[in-house]
Image (cartoon, rainbow, N blue to C red):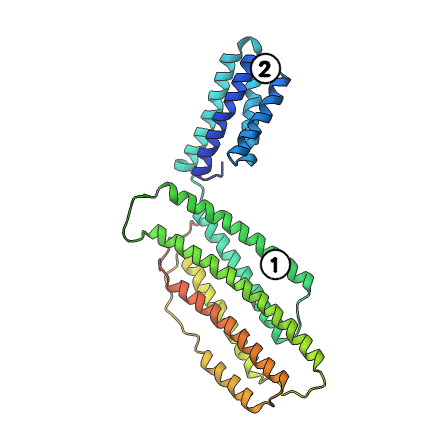
Amino acid sequence: MGESLKSAKRLMKLQTLAFIPAFVLGLTLGPNILSLFIAVILIYQIGIKLKMANQCTIGIVAAIFILTSPPEAFLRTALIRSFGVMMGLGIAIIINRLVWPPQYRAAMVRQAIQLNEMVTRYFRQSVQAYLDNRPMDYKERKRISTMLVNEFRSFDKNYNYFCSERIQFSDPDRFGEETEEEKEQHFFEAYADFCRNLIILTKDNWALADEQSQRLKRWKNQETNPVDPRIPQLITEALDRLEECNQELFGKLTGADPQPFKDPHIWERMDQLLTEWHNTAEQNRTNLHSLVELSLVTYHIRWTIKGVLNMLIMEPCHMPELPREY
């Protein structure tokens, strides 16, 4: 079925309600085209009322199955067919729960890693676009934004299935310290917020690259001191460190042993370089704007690394291993 237990229960409810108009119409108007037409309309209205319009097709198929019973033995045949439909759904739910349960958590973790990899990759590209003074084309940015939205939707879908499954077996009256399951759920909430904020920072970097390009065109006749080449080198080093931290985070998600905390040790050097360049460069508009922009880019990277390191030490520190096929 590929549905959570909560969705499966709602589907069973829709099926039961779909049988009512099918039986009533079959016993009054008989199993014919008119009965089928009316049954389809009624079942669809029931689905809308229950906010399950997408699942109405299953209920309609069941009604058709019932209303195509032979008229001379309608009641007996319809009851046997109804029992067969409900038995099939019941077996599907039992298989999902006991024999071959769907791997909601594994699917969510896999999607979470894929989302983070995509967001981090485009974040790095946005920083590089600023450093190289090559703003990204608007259409390309639009395409990337659409991809990220779709990726988030996939993650949210898996996360909601994961949460729904946990709720089915939680005790609503329990008080006290958080369980490991609750800690894990809160961790993935923070993880999603981190990725969303990283997308915002990526768009900020795109805007900085645009602003820099336009500014340099407007003030092209103004003399400027070139940026100390050690500054972009240190920014690149910080981006490399971000990727290393992300790999440690992916290890935590997949159940690997926690890695020791590693401080990047680059921010003091960056502060020294920016201060030195500011003191030695000519105090004009272009250099002041560049100083502000570089400080913002550096802050964005620093915030991102700090966010990853916080999640590395966030409870639960050690997570279950993924199934081998993942």
Kind of residue at badge 2: Pro
| Residue 24, placed above or below residue 313 | above
Q: Which mark is residue 31?
A: 2
Q: Splitting the image into 4 quarters, where does residue 101 fall?
A: top left
Q: Residues within 10 Å of mark 2 (few under 14, many from 20)?
A: many
- Is residue 326 among the parts visible in the rendering? no
Instruction: Identify the residue at horizontal 56%, vertical 35% (top origin).
Output: 53
Q: Position of residue 21 (x, y in %)?
A: 53, 21
Q: Which residue is mark 1?
A: 145
Residue drawn at point x = 50 percent, y = 67 percent? 243
Q: Give whichever of 308, 178 is nearer the camera.
A: 178
In the displayed structure image, the side of residue 178 where residue 1 appears, left or right: right
Q: Amino acid at mark 1?
A: Ser
Looking at the image, which residue sits at the far left? 176
Residue 301 percent location from the top left of the image: 51, 71
Task: Kindly state the secondary structure of the residue where label 2 is placed.
Answer: loop
Seen in the picture, residue 19 relative to 321 is either above or below; the reply is: above
Front in this rendered view, residue 214 or 152? 214
Marks 1 and 2, the one that precedes in the sequence: 2
Q: Nearer the viewer, residue 307 or 325?
A: 307
